[in-house]
Amino acid sequence: MGEQFDKAASLNELCKAAKECKRGVTWKATPVEYYITRVTSCKKLRDEILAGTYKVHPGDKVYVYKPKKRIATAPWFKDRVWQRSMCNNGVYEDLTRGFILDNIACQKGKGIDMAIRRVIGMLQGLHKVAPGQPVYGIHLDVRKFFPSTPHREIKKMDARRIWEPAFIPYLNEIIDSSKDEREPEIIAQDPFGERGTGLGSQINQLHQVALLDSIDHKAKSLCDCYIRYNDDFLLLSHSKAELRKARQLIEEGLNQLGLTMTDKSGIFKASNGFYFLRKRFIMTKTGKIIIRLHPQALAEERRVLRRLKKDLDAGLIKPEYVQDHYQSWIANAEYAGDAPIRAMDKFYTQIFREKPTYKRKKRYLYGKRNQTLKGGETQKSRSGEPGAQGEAGGRES
């Protein structure tokens, strides 16, 4: 075996992976039981891997209801540990090597915050190049990205990207563990063969992000203001012809991989506003960028708080759980300024008969250092510092 594989299968790395995998799921019995006995459990897993008797379990099917109803696959905890160890010791670096900067999902140091910053930076950059010229954009998507991804294309990508050959059989087994739900006759007629990967597995997430890397490089060379978050494409430009050409290029690239593109919006004007990652971006004539929450965000949070209140009164959850949930919502809502947070704080106080406690970050989406504030404080400008609205008014509410 290679050096990377030997390290990934070592007892030390497997125990380290178990510690990482149990984060956020210690309310479940299986992860806690596995972690308490992690030395013996990881030794048993290591013996299975080295003996060649390890098999990937298909996982449990679960439903994800937000932002829309989807079927996800919850891998067994033992499988999660082995996948994490493989990613920590070569697979992650091999799959993500050569990515463009604006391929942002499922990677270290990247995420929603960086995506919002990049979109703002692109809009402001286009405004500086031609202040009076309108900025156009297009928002594309892949239809049923995880369920329609061909197994054959992912295996070809692994053979091309993964440097450690000993990892390939395990990666192929993870791919094959996601069974195609279609009828055998339909699968036989499909030129791409079996399709579908399980949403929820770390390896599958990386596979999906890496599969469209060749499209990213081609589209980026044609349209500089290009960003992709998993299967969501956003392109911005002063030229409609450039956007149409990039759209055709992306569609052709997806067809070659056996995937189908969906145009969510057509060509739009940035000044009219557009949605990306459930945030609404509006660019004014002066170059100010305004961010709004999705229209359903406040209504959804009110429903969740009412349900949490009932569970709290029934003794099913602890107050800390409610506080953690509200802290998470605040982190998502503070991009849009103070108004939605003030409205939700008022509703929270009416429901729970007490003011919410949380920490806020004074987010500077234009490169300034974040400043942590306590919940309920008004974000005021200090002397010599920019105000809470930021340099371009991105926090206007």
Image: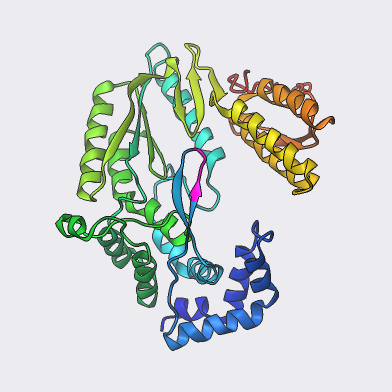
User: Residue at image x 80%, y 27%?
Assistant: 349
Identity of the residue furthest to the front in this view: 314
| Residue 179 image point, x, y percent | 34, 62
Residue 168's quadrant in the figure? bottom left
Q: Quadrant of residue 373?
A: top right
* Residue 273 seen in the current view: yes
Q: Position of residue 126 (x, y in %)?
A: 41, 23
Q: Is residue 375 above or below residue 168?
A: above
- Residue toward you, 329 or 180: 180
Closer to us: 129 or 249: 249
> For this view, does 200 lie left or right of residue 254?
right
Picture coordinates of residue 184, whole percent (x, y)? 22, 61
Image quadrant where one finds the N terminus = bottom left
Image quarter where the C terminus lies is: top right
Note whether 326 is above or below 105 in the view shown. Answer: above
Quadrant of res 390 = top right
Which residue lies most toward the bottom here? 51
Total marks drawn? 0
The verdict on residue 135 being magenta is: no
Task: Tell me how the rendering is colored.
Answer: rainbow
Magenta residues, as a range?
63-67
Magenta-drawn stretch, dominant element (helix, strand or loop): loop
